[in-house]
Amino acid sequence: MRVLHFSITPLAGMPVRLVQALNRHTGVDARLVDLKRFGLYDHDLVFVESPEEALDLAWEADVIHLHNYLDYGSKAFGRIDFGELARAGKRIVRQFHSSPDLVAQVMGITPEALLAQDIPAIAIAQYPERLYPKAMVVPNFVPETDEAYLPTSKPPRWDVFYSPTKDLSAWADRWSTKGMPEATAVIEGVAKRTGCRAKIITGLPLAEALALKRASRIVVDDLVTGSYHLTGLEGLAQGKCVLSFLDERSLALLRHFSGADAHPFVNVRLEDAAEALEYLVREPELTRELGAQGRRWLNDHWPEECMVRFYEHVYELLLEDPDLVRRQPEFSLESDTRYFLFRTLPDLTYRSRAKRWTMPA
């Protein structure tokens, strides 16, 4: 089976990591066409450098895998017409990594128009899945056996590591924020009070960010939205103590895809993070053990080799019948009670938190 991926943005490096995993662990022959060189992550094929090769690969593929901002009418890849490929019998699937508001804004359409598009869709098993109620849910993962993701025996250079990708306030955007200003203030306050060493970075190439993270003791992920991110999975792989706030929906998805009752994160909200961090930075043995437990959990319950099989299954369903790529019944939000518990209530709680928030001194 030949699967060709297309992406116009790096999306935290997940498209290229997914393609590499498919080639390592499955019978899928996967390739990725990035629109241009992003300067942050690995590449396979770059469209602006090899447009004719990309066009040839598109017509040779069995499945076209579009990421986030691409649909049948997208013209970013020149003569590659996804609508024409679909009409010619190519199976098309689209993967969502971000909120409908952000995806629609980039595409220049409304969120309602985006959600109404009739393209077989999958969404990552973090916050995006609850926002795309028809999409099949699939897990994000990292290559935990790769050298850059392995724990190190070297003494840590930093106590706390934080690498937000956006500078939005925690309360400025429900989903696209990582709470950078507020979380940075919390971490810097803890460093001032305890004398711990904090490393806060943004916009570095993945290899550099992973090296800095590997040289740290505690990793701070998203403390605001209720969802973890790839940075948290990277930290777990490296054997770090990872702080992230996970709401009930995120926890349910972790239990489902891992098959484990326990989860590997230190589950803490932004409002409570200062006290938790102050305690943890003074307990190096505890953070080492928490990190070791997280690494064992990832090895046992969330390894790349198992997680990538969910994508292979999507392609198999797609080739059998595109209508089979749809929301799993166990993740349905169609009932009033489930919608309230997993959509409305977390949003209400977020708004309440925003009203009560006071920046720590």
Image: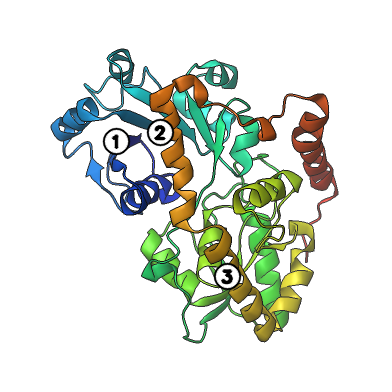
Residue positioned 59% across, 76% down in the render: 292
> Where is the N terminus found, in terms of image quarters?
top left
Mark 1 belongs to which amino acid? Met
Separation of residues labelled 2 and 3 (CA atoms): 30 Å
Mark 2 belongs to which amino acid? Tyr
Separation of residues labelled 3 and 1 (CA atoms): 33 Å
Residue positioned 41% across, 66% down in the render: 145
Which residue is more in the foreground, 296 or 15? 296
- Residue, far front: 320
- CB under 8 Å between discs 2 and 1: yes
Q: How many C-alpha atoms fall within 10 Å of the one at disc 1: few (<14), some, or many (≥20)?
A: some
> Where is the C terminus found, in terms of image quarters?
bottom right
Mark 3 belongs to which amino acid? Arg
Per the image, the residue denoted by label 2 is: 315
Per the image, the residue denoted by label 1 is: 1
Asked which secondary structure carries label 2, the reply is helix
Residue 272 in view:
yes
Is the residue 336 above or below the residue 9 in the image?
A: above
Separation of residues labelled 2 and 1 (CA atoms): 9 Å
Residue 56: x %, y % from top left: 16, 29
The quarter of the picture where residue 73 lies is: top left
State which tag comes first along the sequence, 2 or 1: 1
Is the residue 84 above or below the residue 101 in the image?
A: above
The quarter of the picture where residue 270 lies is: bottom right
Is the residue 280 above or below the residue 346 in the image?
A: below
Asked which secondary structure carries label 3, the reply is helix
State which tag comes first along the sequence, 2 or 3: 3
- CB under 8 Å between discs 3 and 1: no
The quarter of the picture where residue 318 lies is: top left
Asked which secondary structure carries label 1, the reply is loop
State which tag comes first along the sequence, 3 or 1: 1
Per the image, the residue denoted by label 3 is: 296
